[in-house]
Image (cartoon, rainbow, N blue to C red):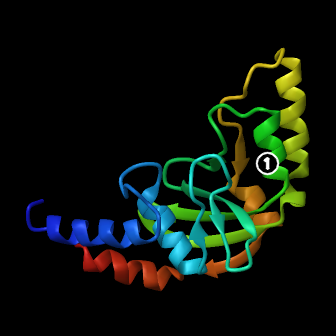
Amino acid sequence: MAALQPYVQRYQQLATRHGIADIFQDNGGKTLQVILTLGIKVSKGREGNDAVDEHGNEYELKTVNSSLTSSFSTHHHLNPEIIAKYRLVDWYFAIYRGIVLDEIYYMPGRHLRHYFDSWERQFHEQGGRALNNPKIPISFVREVGFLVRNFTSTAVLRQGLLFE
């Protein structure tokens, strides 16, 4: 660990320059990789959406480790206010296998309308209690989303060999 620490600190310095305070918290390292790959920036503060492009368009970013789960988490206290915010923006979904980025998909918010409507119904059916992390399946993202970036299996194997 001591030998890696200078590299970890350099990684954090890069993240800090891009508005990510902690690479080990809230998917900070993965978020950094996604925004650098897409050429977008993280939004300032915790109240807005996750990212913004050079034209001021905002995006929601979601990452998933497909080795551990088959769906993207949304929000741990999802309510109509957050759903309304979600409806206004387009989304990027990054699929990782462990710490290796495999694919990034873009999805217009309107393609998620079914989920938003369902979550709002559930919220009201539960008497106004916030939903805990409703999910969006990877299979849905792959079927409906637009593939932005696909990192080939060969490239992934080469990366893995570097760390063996």
In percent of width and height, residue 28 lies at 44, 58
Residue type at mark 1 is Lys
Q: Is residue 161 left or right of residue 129?
A: left
Dot 1 surroundings within 10 Å: few (below 14), some, or many (20 or more)?
few
In percent of width and height, residue 14 lies at 36, 73
Q: Please say whether residue 98 is visible from this viewpoint.
A: no
Q: Is residue 122 left or right of residue 77?
A: right
- Asked if 117 appears above or below 70 in the picture, the reply is above
Quarter assignment of residue 141: bottom right
Q: Which residue is mark 1?
A: 85
Name the image quarter holding the N terminus: bottom left
Residue, far top: 127
Q: Secondary structure at mark 1?
A: helix
Quarter assignment of residue 73: top right
- Asked if 115 appears above or below 155 in the picture, the reply is above
In percent of width and height, residue 64 lies at 56, 55
Q: Is residue 69 left or right of residue 119?
A: left
Q: Is residue 121 left or right of residue 33?
A: right
Residue, far left: 2
- Which residue is nearer to you in this view: 139 or 16? 16
User: Residue, x 84% and y 56% (percent of image)?
Assistant: 88
User: Residue, x 60% and y 65% (percent of image)?
Assistant: 94
Quarter assignment of residue 127: top right
- Asked if 75 appears above or below 27 in the picture, the reply is above
- Which residue is nearer to you in this view: 75 or 143? 75
- Which residue is nearer to you in this view: 110 or 72? 110
- Asked if 81 appears above or below 18 in the picture, the reply is above
User: Residue, x 57% and y 58% (percent of image)?
Assistant: 44
Q: Please say whether residue 113 is visible from this viewpoint.
A: yes
In percent of width and height, residue 24 lies at 35, 53
- Which residue is nearer to you in this view: 18 or 29? 18
User: Residue, x 53% and y 82% (percent of image)?
Assistant: 152
